[in-house]
Image (tube, rainbow, N blue to C red):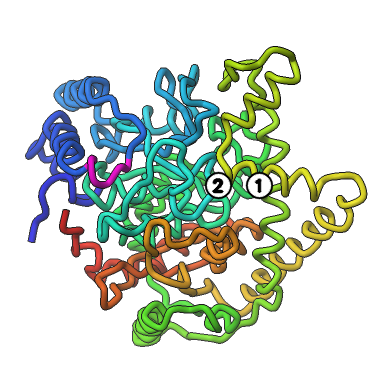
Amino acid sequence: MAHSLPFQSLTQVADQLAAGQVSSVELTQAVIDQTQAVEDRVNAFISTDSVDALAQAAAADQRRAVGELLGPLDGVPIALKDVIAVRDQPLTAGSKMLEKFVSPYDATVTTKLKDAGAVLWGRANCDEFAMGSSTENSAFKTTANPYDLSRVPGGSSGGSAAALAAGEAIATLGSDTGGSIRQPAAFCNVVGLKPTYGLISRYGLAAYASSLDQIGSFTRTVEDAAIMLGAIAGHDDRDSTSFKTPIPDYRAALAEKKGPWKLGIPKEYFGEGLDPEVGAAVEKAIAFYREQGCEIKEVSLPHTEYCLSTYYIIATAEASSNLARYDGVRYTHRSADAKTVEDVYFKSRAEGFGAEVKRRIILGTYVLSSGYYDAYYLRAQKVRTLIRQDFLNAYQKVDAVLTPTTPTPAFKIGETADPLAMYLQDIYTVSVNLAGLPGISIPAGFSEAGLPIGLQLIGQPYQEADLLAIANTYDSTHDWNSRLPEL
């Protein structure tokens, strides 16, 4: 059945816009109406600007009228996680520290979306400074999972995933430092792509852990993900870690690359802690790939057990360094009680940062401190190299690695108060960031309770065209994404 406009895929709405069956203003208004209908329950956005969005949509319709089409994103409403800079729009990063900050410039991905004609709509809620796995760490609101409003949408890009699942945007952008795109995508029954480190510019992204952060997309289908990646990938001189590599036509590659592929199943990812329903859904996907003629091989990633501890040393160390800039002096929250220079620093940071951000800054400062640097940070960097090597060794035998995205379906809001239990949510995703690889989560079924389950595919560096084609083989022949939340 054809879904109402806000629930259609990017590909579908682009086709309708091209055929003149719908205007960008009509499409954008439909998304705004849907947002107004559900947002009081979902809480996906920190801020929206419908006047600005409709003005962008009108401009897209005018371009189309005179034949100046900018591509498949022209006139399509896309929401951005509130860590990505959009000129003259708020940028809070989900923190009281930046509550009143308005971005004076565009991130590179924002510029690329504007160049593609996208209607930039809404600032999606997130865990504060992208630190968390549930979007409960936002200073402003807790986003709910559209499939069960008593549960989390995942994190840290939970607002971006929930907004898409609830029909409040046609596609969204997030950022992924240790699973922050893939985990919420799995919880919210959408496609989440975290590209290879360096493929997409980080200029204009509020930094959390600079050697791990990567911007990526949430979409309804893998084909949509290919369109989004084509629009935002590419080298950028303003990001020193940006990689120079040719950007293929990812969407065209979906039709060209047919497989069959060799897929690796890491034995370390199917042990204790994996929910039986998640395991069963992933086993069904493995069986499907086998039926398609793919060769399924067991592979070993022997340093998997060190991934979480390595990640939380490196990520917190980089966070403590990156977040030093929020000092109450320039553009951040400043304590009204500050009487001295020291007060400005201490009180502003104490008031401006939430508990999880403080926890990570303290951890990071500790592992970087004199006497502990070699024992923790340096050693973690060495283990990180071993983790990457595990994957590169596996890729001698297979084209991609197939795993669960998360150990469980979405958990209840307030259920995981223990930070360590929360960190374990990232068990299958952090390795991808440590190794700098591309990973994608695609919908792979539902639990008995009606909660979405995600399948993760991990590709080789800069081989997104192959990764998307492998994911599309499953995604285009299953219709999990047609099961919408009952809001």
Query: Which residue in the protein does label 1 denote?
Result: 360
Distance, label 1 to label 2, CA atoms, is 8 Å
Name the residue: 55% across, 47% down: 131
The spot of residue 30 in percent (x, y) is: 13, 37
Examine the rendering and report whether any part of residue 16 can be seen: yes
Q: Nearer the viewer, residue 92 or 484?
A: 92
Query: In the displayed image of the protein, which residue is found farthest to the right?
Result: 371
Secondary structure beneath dot 1 equals helix
Q: Which residues are magenta?
A: 39-44
Secondary structure under the numbered disc 2 in the rendered image: loop
Three-letter amino acid code of the residue under disc 1? Arg
Residue contact between numbered discs 1 and 2, judged by CB atoms under 8 Å:
yes
Residue of label 2: 131
> Which quadrant of the view contains residue 386?
bottom right
Question: Furthest residue to the top?
Answer: 339
Rendered position, 194 above or below 241: below
Q: Residue at x 78, y 59 (%)?
A: 380
Q: Establish if 266 lies above or below 317.
A: below
Based on the picture, tell me whether residue 41 belongs to the magenta stretch: yes
Q: Is residue 117 visible?
A: no
Say what amino acid the circle numbered 2 marks.
Met
Disc 2 crowd rating (10 Å Cα; few below 14, some 14-19, many 20+) is many
Q: Could you say where residue 240 lies in the image, as x and y percent from the top left?
A: 68, 35
